[in-house]
Image: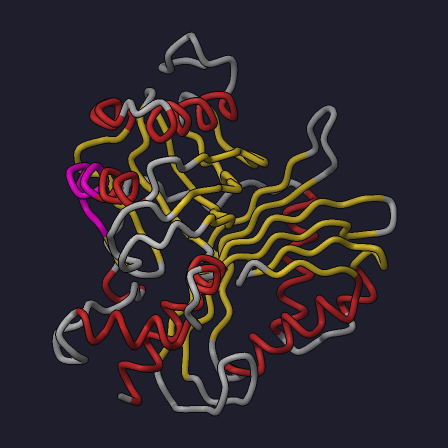
Amino acid sequence: MKGFDPKFTDFPDYIIGITKEIWEDRQIATLHHYYTDDIIVRSPASLVVGNKGVIAATMATLAEFPDRTLFGEDVIWSGTPEEGMLSSHRIITTATHSGDGVYGKASGTKLRYRIIADCHAINNAINDEWLIRDQGAIVRQLGYEPLDYAREMIAKEGGAEHASRPFHPKDDQQGPYKGTGNDNEFGAQYADILTRIMGADMAAIPDCYDRACHLEYAGGITGHSHDFADKFWMGLRASFPSATFKIHHQIGRDDPLMPPRAALRWSLTGKHDGWGSFGAPTGAEVHIMGASHAEFGPWGLRREYVLFDETAVWKQIALTTG
């Protein structure tokens, strides 16, 4: 890996390795050389520019969840060391809510949730990132409903006039990464499936999903087979029927000892103008940042992981409705 520390055998080893160094080994100072000073980190909740903000957020999280673990389930990547590489890193994390922080007074609750982080790296450093935590899963385990948590956050931030606004493309800043992934057949196949679903062709699910598919969805929910997939995707799309669906990045890979797989980063942008997973339509303008991983087998899509931040969606709705 030209330009990268030789202790890393390949790009997945780099991504998984630095994650462990920073979080579990408490080498937070390594962020000074693993992240560039001017890194842009986008999450559904905010846009952060600069490594100082990343380091501060990392320390605050570890103060609240000191025993946090981050297990790398997969790294789906594209690019080259010379031109830069983009990793879509799926993590399952465990943590105990042992300190006071953004989630309130320490409760001792043990949490388990997923994250997907898309990171662009070149010359041993990350300089562009898109980060999605399953906030819905986190707050439910802490005893909140996502809408109630969003309302509480608005109140803590001084009310609707002063509350921070979730990420929206109009506020984005262009980072150094301008790629859109690769042209592997499995990335294209998964992109076609989601495009069909978002175009109201729900027949894509029985057409393309294995009948025994295993599904892990936003909110920490687990299910199997076509009906579960249909309920999830239908509920999301029905809430925002006129919103624009866009795939921003797609990767496909077919690696030794791994099933063919794909990673997509996508969005829905538009009005909350339908009945679905987000209740009665409010007309609120909403942007949803989504990330999905899929694995394929002999009978179609056999595993799917989909994340977006329900609390950020509800916050956008609550800021409109009061």
Quadrant holding the C terminus: bottom left
Which residues lie in the magenta part?
48-56
Above or below 204: residue 8: above
Residue in the picture at 27% in, 81% down: 319
- Characterize the magenta stretch by its predominant secondary structure: helix
Counting from the top left corner in percent of width and height, residue 270 is at 41, 79
Instruction: Please tell me whether residue 308 belongs to the stretch shown in magenta.
Output: no
Residue 174 is left or right of residue 1, and the answer is left
Q: Pick the residue in front: 228 or 6.
A: 228
Counting from the top left corner in percent of width and height, residue 175 is at 27, 44
Residue 28 is left or right of residue 276, and the answer is left
Quadrant holding the N terminus: top left
Residue 45 is left or right of residue 138, and the answer is left
Counting from the top left corner in percent of width and height, residue 11 is at 49, 23
Residue in the picture at 63% in, 71% down: 233
Instruction: Please tell me whether residue 51 belongs to the stretch shown in magenta.
Output: yes
Counting from the top left corner in percent of width and height, residue 29 is at 21, 24
Residue in the picture at 71% in, 72% down: 230
Q: Pick the residue in front: 214 or 246.
A: 214
Q: Residue furthest front?
A: 108
